[in-house]
Image: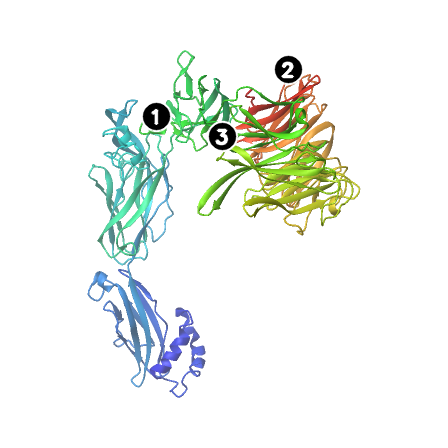
Amino acid sequence: MRADSLSCLSCILRRFPRGGCIALLSLILVVIGGCKTEQDAEDPYILGTPPDDAYLGVEYAYNFGAFDSDDILDYSLTNAPSWLALEDTSNKARQGVIMRGVPGLTGGSRGRDDLGTTENITLVGNDGRAAGTQPFDIEVQENVLSLAIDDFIEGEAFEAPEERDNRCEAPEIGEIGRQTYEVNEYDDDGAVVKTVQRTSDTYPVLVRVLLDQPSVTRVEVAFELDSSFNPQRCDEDIDPPHQRCENGAANDNEAIIGKDIVGLGTQSEPTLPVPSYLQYQPDDDGFLSKGVITLEPGITECYIRLEVIEDTEAEPLETLNIRLTEVRSGLAGLGSSNSGVRELLRIADNEPTVRLETLAGGTRDALNVGAVREYVALISGERAGAYSVKLGEDDESDVILGEEFLVEVRNADGDWVEGDLLTFAEGIEEMRFRIRIPDDYTNGQLENDRFILLGLDERYQSGRENFAASADADKLRVNINELTSSLEVGNSTSFIPTDTAFGHNGRLFIAGYRVDDGDRPWVRIVTQKGEVTQQPLSEAAIAQGGEPVIGFVERNFKEGDDDVTRYEFVVSFGSEQAPDGAPGGNGVDVHTLLYFFDTAQNPDSYVPVWSIVTGTPGDDIPRWTGIDEDGGYVVNAGESNGQWPNETAAGGVDSFLQRIDTTVDGNSVVPVVAWTRQVGSAGHDESVVGGSTSTSSPLLIGDSSGAVRGQSQLGGKDAFFFLASSADSTINVRQRGTAGNENLSDGIYGTNNVWLVGQSTGNYSVESGDGNRSLKRRQINSQAGFALSYTALGDVTRAFTFNDTDDTSTESLRAVRTYDRDILVAGSTNGNFSESEGNSQIHPILARISLEENSDDGTDSSREWRAQLSLDGAEGEIERLENYRDDEITALVKIVSGTSETWEVRLFTGEGLPLH
């Protein structure tokens, strides 16, 4: 067969696994007929394709097959590298031949000169009349050494690896070693006062040394530990030796060889014998931190044993490198480019840790100027002897310890004294301390409250023995409150508040109307210090039941190449008058006014952007308003007994959801109604309690005693909600509830759920079955509050009931807000909602519910609590709730005393403690 015929056959044979060619001989004979058929069927041909890859120091071998029906073949290699040869076939001719060699060793021991690719190597099989050939290429590569490492933990040894033929026998790691080293001791300023010698236990760990392919020769490679620690590198304006050098910012996270980790401890060999394949050598400081490891022929995994030193210093995660630096014997590559191997070692600390908490177990609190409160430090982890912590403000704290707030600890006599050092005697797991805000504290001209972020003074503790580390938990955050008494913001003879929203810099916006100004709408703005400004909004008087609602937004957007932050608020109210106060003559219409914060004013103030009046021939009342954070459009949610353009009235009072865009008209901006959607039920009234722009499209929340837009009516009164995105988008109403009455009073979108609050004579729960959840209601004896949550698609997720202990009093909920991953609800009770035995007056109530999925009766009291306010003989309820930065709860409290009504702003901590 000619070479071109063999080429055709070779193409076919390459499609099959190289070990299966001979077994496919009969098939190949058939295939030959598809190549050049004019050749003698008895001409020779070669079977098999050798591997493309070879490795320095690793045997390369391949057994070719061949076929010739009536002749014995002779074989030869052409264009072969010097290291590759055929086995001696003299007087041993047969149908096939073995090709063998060791790159770098056979054929002259050329070493790395054998690296590279040899192309068109050809095996020739000759029967004296014709020849069969098989061309192929071989690339010789480095036999690469690498390292595999797991993280280390002080005080923990590794488990021995499984035994395998290709592995070294693992070193002894079942015992502990010992290491002697020196440590510096410091005064309070960090100066070195003396150097002492320490001997500590060490725990063995392993670094795996991997060779890609089994070598035919012994491979010896040098290794060493390498750290960037430099005791001469100091913090600014510090000279060595000093704590701020060894443990300064420049040496953060740098492990110290001989003190944190070593190859072989100074007294370790009796308990941790060194295997024959490991040799340790001293570094420049005398520590055994480098050496040589030997991999015998055929071994591809071996082990460098290191020892992690168990000290008593609290340390962050420390790092250093281990490097393979030189192949002392054998053929192996230090990485693919033979330039070296380096891997990062990470050492985690195991010192006891301390976390700071409130007495209720939380990490957030608020404290009045001039007040003091106890907190707790909790230590955890194994320890022997006493451990200390030094308290200090975090870098992100707004205020400085010792200047704007004080920490107090108990002295030996049990008296509270100023100090920041806590010492946990052995067996003691909890220590109390206090935070005090001085009477003369002031926030200056800043509007937002400042806060304490208290943790451990890790810079002081670093490098000092028997100090505990900071737990992996939130720092203790304490908001400093300057509004130390309740603030009256309205009364029945002047300003009546109706809605609230938090604005920028902690300003509380209170919308309402003034009865001493003809029931015209006003807004009052209260700072965190209690300073109140106010401004009128319109000459139109509000209609009965058309009380103002307010929304605020902070919008961030691009204006050309500039990043712009814009603060806006919107107020909507119902009025029978025109904006100038003249009669409207078209029932109650919706008045919507948009304002923005104008820094060009002197002083800075909110100025009008636009106003618009919208409505139907009937009465239209807004119940919620807001501004979209991204698009800047305004959304109104409300009630109407008329018919909006292009919409259908269902009968009675329907709900409506409206979007108003801000557009440019010449040099002005004007409002344009983008769409209004109307949804109701035949012959029944809908009540709207809330809305949102935080969902994918504007959201409306309400309740109804009818079947809303064809939905199933579940009970006497059901909740419903829906989204609308355009004038003609499909509206899918989610009508939800039970066979009872779910009377809503507020609703929001928060924590990725729609939250509905109200009151009913039922106890609510969520049951799961067959992968579905369903809302269940059990009849109770008295009215209780409830909070139900649903996804935007209408799937129930949580249910909570707020009842008095004896199930005899009346609880009503008026407001709901999110707070630090949880939910707040508020309203009133006329009984014992929380520790008010024998009460028969109407008291404000406030509660927090944890949304942790695994929360139960064991939930810490910082996130699961109830509060009931006594009003010194008066009665009242919380009408609105706001969340100030997850630092304080702000409540609008209505107080009724005889015939007078007043409204006050009252503040609470996140744990329900009153700040007034």
Q: Earlier in the sequence, mark 3 or mark 2?
A: 3
**Coordinates of residue 127 in the picture (x, y in percent):** 31, 83
How far is mark 1 from mark 2, CA to CA? Answer: 52 Å
Which label number is shown at residue 872? 2
**894 sits left or right of 368 in the view:** right
The residue carrying mark 3 is 603
> Mark 1 and 2 residues: CB-CB less than 8 Å, in contact?
no
Residue nearest the observer in this picture, 765 or 141: 765
> Which residue in the rendered view is the most extreme toward the right?
683
Query: Badge 1: few (under 14), some or many (20 or more) residues near its Cα, within 10 Å?
Result: many
Up-down relation of residue 657 to residue 56 (above or below): above
**Coordinates of residue 206 in the picture (x, y in percent):** 33, 43
**176 sits left or right of 672 in the view:** left
- Residue drawn at point x = 69 percent, y = 46 percent: 677
How far is mark 3 from mark 2, CA to CA? Answer: 40 Å
- Residue drawn at point x = 59 percent, y = 24 percent: 905
Specify the amino acid type for callout 2: Asp
**Coordinates of residue 856 in the picture (x, y in percent):** 59, 31
Q: Nearer the viewer, mark 1 or mark 2?
A: 2
- Residue drawn at point x = 27 percent, y = 47 percent: 323
Colour pattern of the rendering: rainbow
Residue nearest the observer in this picture, 303 or 914: 914
Question: Could you tell me which quadrant the C terminus lies in?
Answer: top right
Residue 820 seen anywhere in this rendered image of the structure = no
Query: Badge 2: few (under 14), some or many (20 or more) residues near its Cα, within 10 Å?
Result: few
**Coordinates of residue 185 in the picture (x, y in percent):** 27, 25
**679 sits left or right of 127 in the view:** right
Question: Could you tell me which quadrant the N terminus lies in?
Answer: bottom left
Where residue 345 sits, quadrant-wise, is top left
